[in-house]
Amino acid sequence: MPSALPFLEFGADRDTAEVTVLMLHGLGADGHDFADVAHMICEAARPQAWRFVLPHAETIPVTINMGMTMPAWYDILALSHPRAVDWETVTKSEQQIEELLRQEKAGKVFLAGFSQGAAMALQVGLKNQNSIAGILALSGYLLEDDSHPVPSPARDIPVGLFHGDDDEVVPLQAAQESFASLKANRYSPSLKIYPHLGHSVNQAEVQDLFEWLIQHS
């Protein structure tokens, strides 16, 4: 088994949480990247007991960044659409995230992520549909190729895609193509586009994230 991932936690503890959000950071970041958002949402959700788990990905060499080592969920080989990735590193992170999911006891557990973390939230969530309440992908994309198709839907699982139209790292086209692929595979995703937003998250998106979670909790 891959080594366990360290993580930050906010809000309720594992035994008392009613809703848990497992939030995956982007390439080169770590769990601290969404600590303020996690704290804000846990406070806003009271009196309901919400919990955020923010894991730190392992540090690995990343090909598109000249082989420099950094926190990453997988190695990106080329900035194509869809991304060309090292699937062995994807699989290792999948197993680590699935282990974190198994540890959570809340009645509703959501998978969420930003950028590369959003790709992993989709990757793990679509394979573990009966274990989670929904998937949130911020500025992300589906990981798929001819050898790794999108899994068939096991149920009507909520999937929310959120993306800025000025994203210079993961272009809006990637989200639109992911949306179309999910629809073609009989999912019912939603796509919210934010004008003049680059590869980041703004206050409006955080508010929409919270409202989406409330709607599906």
Image (cartoon, rainbow, N blue to C red):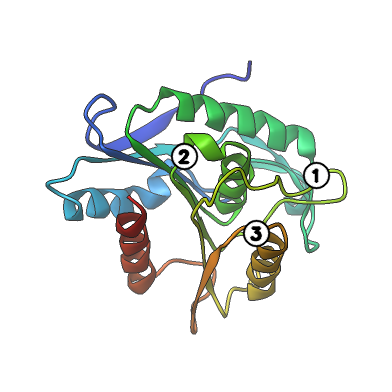
Q: What residue type is labelled 3?
A: Tyr
Among numbered discs 2 and 1, the one appearing first in the sequence: 2
Residue 148, labelled with which disc? Answer: 1
Residue extending furthest toward the right: 146
As measured in the structure, the alpha-carbon distance from the residue carrying label 3 to the one carrying label 1 is 14 Å
Q: Callout 2: 10 Å neighbours few (<14), some, many (20+)?
A: many
Residue 105, image x, y percentages: 34, 27
Q: Is residue 75 left or right of residue 12?
A: right
Q: Nearer the viewer, mark 3 or mark 2?
A: 2
Q: Is mark 1 on a helix, strand or loop?
A: loop
Relative vertical location of residue 6 with respect to residue 176 in this rendering, above or below: above
As measured in the structure, the alpha-carbon distance from the residue carrying label 2 to the one carrying label 1 is 21 Å
Q: Mark 3 points at which residue?
A: 141
The quadrant holding residue 92 is top right
Q: Is mark 3 on a helix, strand or loop?
A: loop
Relative vertical location of residue 99 with respect to residue 66 in this rendering, above or below: above
Contact check, label 3 and label 2, Cβ < 8 Å: no
Q: Residue at x 69, y 46 (%)?
A: 152
Q: Is residue 5 visible?
A: no
Residue 209, image x, y percentages: 37, 61
Q: In which quarter of the image is the N terminus?
A: top right
Q: Is residue 197 left or right of residue 14?
A: right
Q: Which residue is drawn at 33% across and 59% down?
A: 215
Q: What element carries label 2?
A: loop
Relative vertical location of residue 157 with respect to residue 7 in this rendering, above or below: below
Q: Residue at x 77, y 32 (%)?
A: 88
Among numbered discs 3 and 1, the one appearing first in the sequence: 3
As measured in the structure, the alpha-carbon distance from the residue carrying label 3 to the one carrying label 2 is 19 Å
Q: Is residue 20 visible?
A: yes
Q: Name the residue under label 2.
A: 132
